Amino acid sequence: MSKKVLVCGAGGFIGGHLVEYLRRQGFDDIRAVDRKDRDDWYQVHDYSEHLVLDLQHRDACFAAMKDVDIVYNLAADMGGMGFIENNKALCMLSVLINTHLLEAAKEAGAGRFFYASSACVYNGEKQTDPANPGLKEADAYPAMPEDGYGWEKLFSERMCRHFREDFGIETRVARYHNVYGPHGTFEGGREKAPAAICRKVIDAKLGGHGSIEIWGDGEQTRSFMYVDDCTKGTTDILNSDILEPINLGSEEMVSINQLVDIVEEIAGITLQREYKLDAPKGVRGRNSDNAMIRELMGWEPSISLREGMEQTYRWIYDQICDRYPARGAARVAAGSGDALVS
């Protein structure tokens, strides 16, 4: 636990949770790096060193890597499907981050290097059926990933492999499947489906209107992983002997309509659904096949969607009420959880 740990993208959603998790695991020397101004970080932990650096630049990566033993690269320009489909070039520029970080890790002699990849690397032809049986790790090839973001992730996976083979860096790669939870983006265009749906249901509840807009027909399917499972899986994979990219996600697949059902139940309301069929909606069906992680690690993400969504809803509800006091007037005096039905 005396090793120096670098968390890249620490000002983001998963990165902020990872810094906290590492601290709880006993790591005292954590360097947190993000390009956002510190006031814009999702979480700031006083016990870690903070650097504001744009890791798309080579010099910034070498500065961040000084005296580092363990690297977690979660830094990327990304968001939900609306952002990914409309910002392909920006998403691909993240390849500079991983390229320069691997170079810097090689020069610094870092011991372990984790790269956060994505289920967006998977071949699109394997995701045309809402009843997706689960994407196995081998399904990334032959390659036909999500355009832009998925190609960048797949390329960076290969770069990690070859830096391990050619230079001896102990690289590990996990393919994240739709991570959600508190302290994440829930508005502004980069939010993902769980947070977006929570926000829309909360807006309907506090605003007194009875409808919700859903992108697509609501029958597209996904599996969603709660952030606590993500941070545990991330550190366990980094410390494992698993050399090839591995799924890190839940096998609890639901349709978007079913996800709305869950949030409505948490909120205690039922809304009329308005389907926006021309909105970005991604692949038709995506789920994680966890056979490999169960076999090699004896573990898999297990926090239920209902449990995780309740925690996420409560946090977003409080944020909306705090940011927009007029909406918060709908709360009763009991406190932040009063709008929920258990």
Image (cartoon, rainbow, N blue to C red):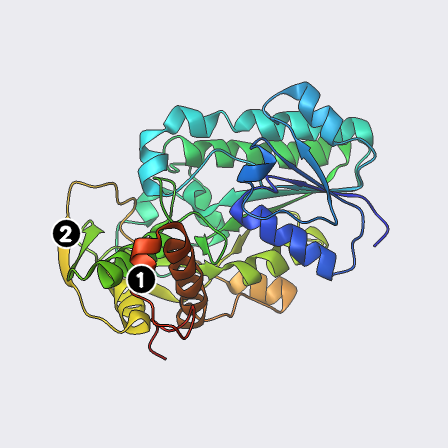
Identify the residue at horizontal 31%, vertical 66% (top origin).
263
Identify the residue at horizontal 45%, vertical 61% (top origin).
315
Identify the residue at horizontal 66%, vertical 32% (top origin).
162
- According to the picture, the residue beneath numbered tag 2 turns out to be 275
Q: Is residue 286 visible?
A: no
Q: Is residue 198 visible?
A: yes
State yes or no: discs 1 and 2 in contact (Cβ < 8 Å). no
- According to the picture, the residue beneath numbered tag 1 turns out to be 329
Q: Amino acid at mark 1?
A: Ala
Query: Tag 2 or tag 1, which sits nearer the N-term?
Result: 2
Mark 1: few, some, or many residues within 10 Å (few <14, many ≥20)?
A: few
Q: Quadrant of residue 90?
A: top left
Left or right position of 341 against 26 = left
Q: Secondary structure at mark 1?
A: loop
Q: Is residue 63 above or below residue 161?
A: above
The extreme right residue here reads 2
